[in-house]
Amino acid sequence: MDTNVIPIKENIYWVGVNDYETQLFEAVWPLPEGVSYNSYLIVDEKVALVDAVKHTTSHVLLKKLKHVLKDRPIDYMVINHMEPDHSGAVAMLAELYPDMQIVGNKKTLEYANDYYHIKSQTKEVKEGDTLNLGKHELQFYLTPMVHWPETMVTYEKTQKILFPADIFGGFGALKGGIFDNEVDLNYYETEIRRYFSNIVGKYSKMAQKALKKLEGLDIQIIAPTHGPVFKDNPSYIIDKYDKWSRFEAEDGVVIAFASMYGNTQEMAEIVARGLSENGITKIRMYDVSYKHASYIINDIWQFKGFILGSCTYNTRIFPHMETLVNMLENKQLKNRYVGVFGSYTWGGGAFKGLKEFMDKSNLEPVEPSFAVKGSVSEDDVQQCYALGKNMAEAIKG
Ligand code: FEO
């Protein structure tokens, strides 16, 4: 081996790239352990590359392609998803392989023109169309909005491999192992859920539609564009995805608080005690100033309840909490219990904002919701504890 090309089946290779340089995915979501851009090469009478990589890592992909293909050209570049973390290398490949055809649906090809001004070298495919490579045959299914409007999946019929783009993908670079039975699956499951909840979760309804569409396929291997390849047990990740996109959750509560001088934290801790003394063991507690919203949203996707508490800052919700609230509104989460509380010194504002969020959401509110002026009094302790206790009772049904 003179470069890191990994066979996933006979004549089908992982030629993906690990990126440890990008610190924030989409300039928003932290990547403490990097991310992989998975690209797959099928070598047959015709050569097809399924999904590519971010442009900053094109040279690594190119080295791998040359290693396998030598001077042989690529015939087809299948683009399941145009987001530039996968399509960034396409313009370079199109130039390098002038006879290569870019395979995508109508929307994909529209975006290929928008992003890379590619007007020719294209081959449009529609729902259910097939592409014969020799021994291997590809079939295409449209899965719009998981995660962009053009997203589709490619099913390799001979070896029964699904290339599902972002679906089933997650954060975390691949560290030697690329298959589900070679990696720490607990770590990747958390990072796949963080990818799902932050990037795809808003489109859960469309994810459900995609899962229904794929139900009839005999899938032996799932080869997504990020994270591990599921070869040993593909149904493991299908089941998880199904559960997450149906908003199913476990018993447990996330408390996220914003506190400048400790008073709102004290409230949060009494709420947490109310939870704990009433049977909730899985309690996740975060100060929003020091924990990126990405991780908090991931936990909120995992557990049945969450409670937001914020001090007031310039008559509004504290800035980092406001960011979290905006993100949660955008996600359109369902099937959760929610509680809120606030604190203030003069006019207030944080509690009003959080209460508006709770009232406008489709979530199940848990009372009491309240604001404390200054520091926590004896009466305030009762309210904080009651919120925790009532949330615990709601969770346990
Ligand atoms: Fe991995 Fe939606 O791009």
Image (cartoon, grey):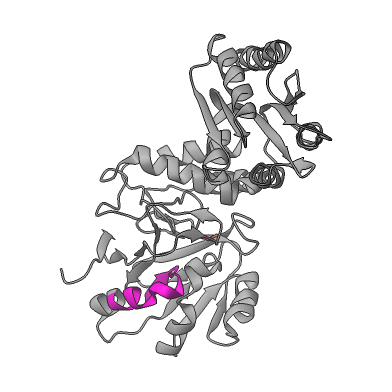
Q: Is residue 287 above or below residue 194?
A: above
Q: Is residue 239 above or below residue 221?
A: above
Q: Is 59 colored magenta in this rendering?
A: yes
Residue drawn at (81%, 34%) of the image: 346
Residue 353 spot, x, y in % from top left = 79, 38
Quarter of the image for the N terminus: give it.
bottom left
Quarter of the image for the C terminus: give it.
top right
> Which span of residues is magenta-colored?
44-63
Residue 228 spot, x, y in % from top left = 36, 51
Front residue (pair 204, 221) = 204
Say if residue 97 shows up in the picture.
no
Q: Is residue 25 above or below residue 79?
A: above
Q: Quadrant of residue 186?
A: top left
Residue drawn at (63%, 45%) of the image: 320
Tell me how many marks there are.
0
Front residue (pair 384, 75) = 384
Q: Is residue 205 above or below residue 77?
A: above
Q: Quadrant of residue 23?
A: bottom left
Image check: 244 left or right of 345?
A: left
Residue 251 spot, x, y in % from top left = 54, 21
Residue drawn at (25%, 75%) of the image: 68
Say if residue 174 shows up in the picture.
yes
Q: Residue furthest left?
A: 1
Residue 123 spot, x, y in % from top left = 55, 78
Residue drawn at (69%, 42%) of the image: 318
